[in-house]
Amino acid sequence: MMADEERVRTVQELYDLSGKIALVTGGYGLYGRWLSQAMAEAGAHVVIASRDVERCEEYAQELQEAGGLASGYRLDQSEEDSIIALRDHIDEQFGRLDIFINNAVGRFGVENLLEADTDAWVDYMRVNGAGVMWTSKHFGKYMHEQGSGSIINISSIYGMVGPTFHIYEGSDVTSPAEYAFVKGGMINLTRAMATLLGPQVRVNCICPGGLFNDQHPVFVENYCKHCPLGRMAGPEDIKGPAVFLASDAAQYVTGCILPVEGGWTAW
């Protein structure tokens, strides 16, 4: 029960991320650039991290010129030492981490499970399996020890349902089996982390659908026909849910698997 004198915050206050420190791994990529932009626009200082530090710094400069707070830093998710170095950098520069968006994914692989090469599969899992474990471990532990934080894992519709292969017919696009493997695992990892790190840290997961990125027109047409809302996702579709889960508007939400896919998984 709330004390009579306790003021209920406004919606604007609940969604405000001013003064927060947010880390987005893969922070200038397909989804990452919009996730980074969302954090900056909501008031957080966003740390944009990936292997290409120059592109991270360039995008951070763009966000700064638009009035946001941002910095770029190198992160190689296939190397645990790189993850530890980023954690230590954040601790030294800011003294805390309030939001961690676990977004980085290596988009390479064997594509066809029936022709899978063991070495290629293992290489993929070092980045997207072991790498996700390392980021979850080191940033999750850091936030748990500081006693607060919000972690947002980025999975996919193909972590929830199997690939719809007919939409790729006549195009140069496909969906590799190893991608479904790691994105499905991220969903249950989210639940495990939520129960392990609570009540100090909230852990939730966004499962986005396809983001329009000038893909093959046949694929886009097929995708839109299959999607109940009749279109692919745009930047605003990923930005809003991320700010919600990062903010105090979701202060009683943890272990949530949030589809952001225009109804794709409703079939």
Image: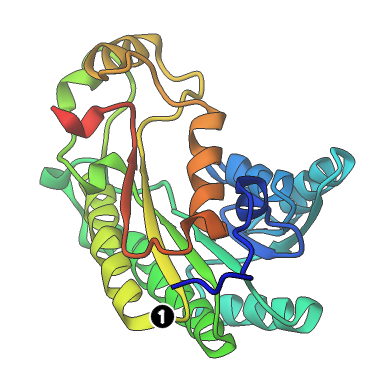
In the displayed structure, 128 sits above or below 159; it is below
Residue 129 x %, y %: 33, 67
In the displayed structure, 14 sits above or below 65; it is below
How many marks do you count on the picture?
Answer: 1
Residue 259 x %, y %: 31, 41
**Label 1 SS:** loop
> Is 236 in front, or is 86?
236
Q: Quadrant of residue 236?
A: top right
Q: Quadrant of the C terminus?
A: top left
Q: Quadrant of residue 166?
A: top left
Question: Residue under circle 1?
Answer: 199
Relative to 36, is 119 on the left or the right? left
* Residue located at (63% from left, 79% from top): 87
* Residue located at (41% from left, 64% from top): 252
> Is 20 in front, or is 160?
20
Classify 10 Å Cα crowding around label 1: few (below 14), some (14-19), many (20 and above).
Answer: some
Q: Quadrant of the N terminus?
A: bottom left
